[in-house]
Amino acid sequence: MADLQVELNTTAEAGVLDEPSTERSAEPFPEPFPEPAQPAISEPEAESASEPEAEPTSEPEAEPASEPDAEPAWDPDPLPDPLRRAHALLAAHPVADGYSGLPWALRELPWCDLELGESGVEADVPRLRAGGVGAQFWSVHVPENLSGDRALSVTLEQLDFIKHVVGDHPEGLRLARSASEAVDARHCGRIATLIGPARGAAIGDSLATLRALKDLGLCSLTLSGTSWAGPDGLSPFGDEVVRELNRLGVLPELSGASEATAHRVLTLSRAPALFVRSGALALREAPGNLSDGLLTALGKAKALCLVPLAAEQTGSSIQEVADHLDHVRRLAGPECVGLSGMYDTPAAHPEGLADVSRYPHLVAELIERGWPDAELAMLTWGNVQRALRGADFTARATRERQRRQAAAG
């Protein structure tokens, strides 16, 4: 029995692998595939094998015949370099268009689809995207022959109509009331729609009406054409309107205003003022264009001149529009110039700027004239954002100051 136990392996402890018994005879495993025997090589053969073979002499190869010049490679992007740069810049800094008459133009159409494209207008969503537009001010101007209650009621109709149009096109448009909301719309892939300007005649002589329009989304108010902003400047009530605009965060708009009114508003307003349809009077004598003295004052006040793409005011070609932009930039400064398309208004447009999709061609012209990218970014987007932020900041500061005065009194 003892001999039997010696021959058996003891049970391995837990966790220890069984080891083969040393008692067993270790027989070598057979080679699975024995290597074939190498034939013996004699010494002469070995020496000849070790010597390198002599390379055979051959005739020099004839050079291949020269092939005809290959055709240039096809360029998948046929745009010239300035236009390519313009598209790239607008992708990062889109156009904030200071004036669009689209709401009034759409009233004349029985039906529209701005997202698929609408041939009855000059600005639909596909063309806005093609032109690199990131925001638009939709004017609620009403005909000048309307005044009093009729002007107010039509303005309210326009405000309501804008909200319905934007609501019907949620994939392309989004309402915005401030700089931050405009940026949010852009980040969501939408085109920001800001309401304004409205005619000052719509508020009559009532600051309460102005506050109601602000609550409905109004962003700017045109002061010209009213009883309180005439050729001699602002009346005392006009001063109160400007102060209330500052408190509410609504931008004062001065296109068509007298120089006396413009200078008074530039002095009085703590928020940036806008001139949304004004070129350079020195280059073209047209209603609404600004003198060099007013452009200089505008620059000192950090207001904003939005040059219109309207043949009557800025000429019939892209080059003439660029001349106006150069002039305003030189006198007011690069931080005080912007763009107003004036699309979907009765205004005729310069050649080459027939609709909103043509903005890159204007930017390409400015690139060829040597505008730096930083100033182009201010022209297209940054300066309007600065004005909107200035209005928001002024409104908060004014309300805080009034609250402290009320608490102290």
Image (cartoon, grey):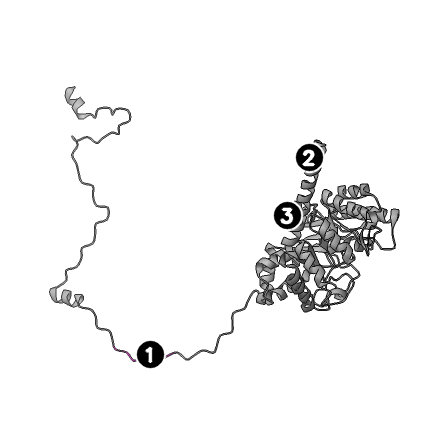
Q: Amino acid at mark 3?
A: Val
* Residue 388, above or below 90: above
Q: Quadrant of residue 320?
A: bottom right
Residue 406 point in image, percent of width and height: 72, 33
Residue pictured at 63% horizontal, 48% vertical: 183
Q: Which residue is mark 1?
A: 61
Q: Quadrant of residue 24?
A: top left
State the residue in front, 382 or 128. Answer: 382
Task: Tell me the number on the disc at residue 371.
Answer: none
Q: As drawn, is 287 to the left or to the right of 318?
A: right
Q: As drawn, is 134 to the left or to the right of 72?
A: right
Q: Which residue is mark 3?
A: 183
Residues drawn in magenta:
57-63
Mark 1 neighbour density, 10 Å: few (under 14) some (14–19) many (20 or more): few
Q: Is residue 133 magenta?
A: no
Q: In whole angstroms, how far apart are the C-alphas of marks 3 and 2?
A: 32 Å
Q: Disc 3 vs disc 1: which is toward the camera?
A: 3
